[in-house]
Every structure is written in C-alpha cells, then in structure tokens.
Image (cartoon, rainbow, N blue to C red):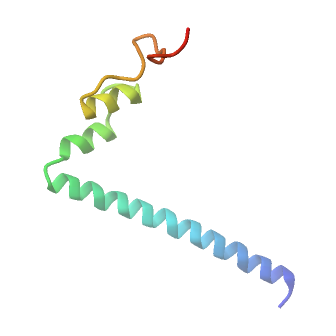
Amino acid sequence: MTIESLMANIWLMMLEAFVLGAVVTVIAGLVIREVLKRRNYHDVVVDVVEPESQNWEVNLAKAFNQETLTDWKGVRKGARK
C-alpha cells in the first residue's frame, strides 16, 4: 500500500464522517420538530422557523417573556458610555 492510497483512504473516511454527521443532524432536527408538533408546541416551532422580528434578541426575549439586554438604540444596558 503506497502513501498516496493511504492518504486517499483517509480523505474518503473524513468525507464519509462529515456526510454521515450532516445526515444524522438533519434527521435529529426533523425528529425533534415532529415531537414538538405532536406535543402541541407547534407555535414554538413556527416562531423559530419564521421569526416575527429580524432581531434575534427580541425573539429570544419574547420566547422567555423577559426584557432584552439592549435598549431600543442597540446599546447594551449597563454599558459604560
């Protein structure tokens, strides 16, 4: 076995592991989504997939019913001026 074929085998195994990881991640996401739907958390799934606001912090604060960490100008609360 030459060094070239050994390197080729290593690259193929790395590619195979990457593809397998991606497939497992997608399947796990679909399973979690179905479980949430069946437990009547459909609104949570829809809000995550189709957020009302483009600001991730506002969406997260709405989800947990809390204030945001920044004020309306985007400045962090409690930051030195």
Q: In this rendering, is residue 8 above or below 25? A: below
Residue 31 placed where, x, y %? 29, 62
Q: Nearer the viewer, residue 62 or 13?
A: 62
Using the rendered view, name the quadrant where residue 27 is placed: bottom left
Q: Nearer the viewer, residue 65 or 41?
A: 65
Location of the N terminus (image quadrant): bottom right
Q: In this rendering, is residue 64 above or below 2? A: above
Q: At x 40% / y 23%, what residue is drawn?
A: 69
Q: Nearer the viewer, residue 48 or 81?
A: 81
Q: Nearer the viewer, residue 77 or 12?
A: 77
Q: Number of marks in the image? A: 0
Please give left or right for residue 42 compared with residue 1 in the image.
left
Using the rendered view, name the quadrant where residue 4 is placed: bottom right
Q: At x 24% / y 29%, what residue is drawn?
A: 65
Residue 21 placed where, x, y %? 51, 66
Q: In this rendering, is residue 16 above or below 37? A: below
Q: At x 40% / y 12%, what residue is drawn?
A: 72
Q: At x 63% / y 69%, what residue is drawn?
A: 15
Using the rendered view, name the quadrant where residue 13 is placed: bottom right
Location of the C terminus (image quadrant): top right
**Residue lying farthest to the top in this orientation:** 81
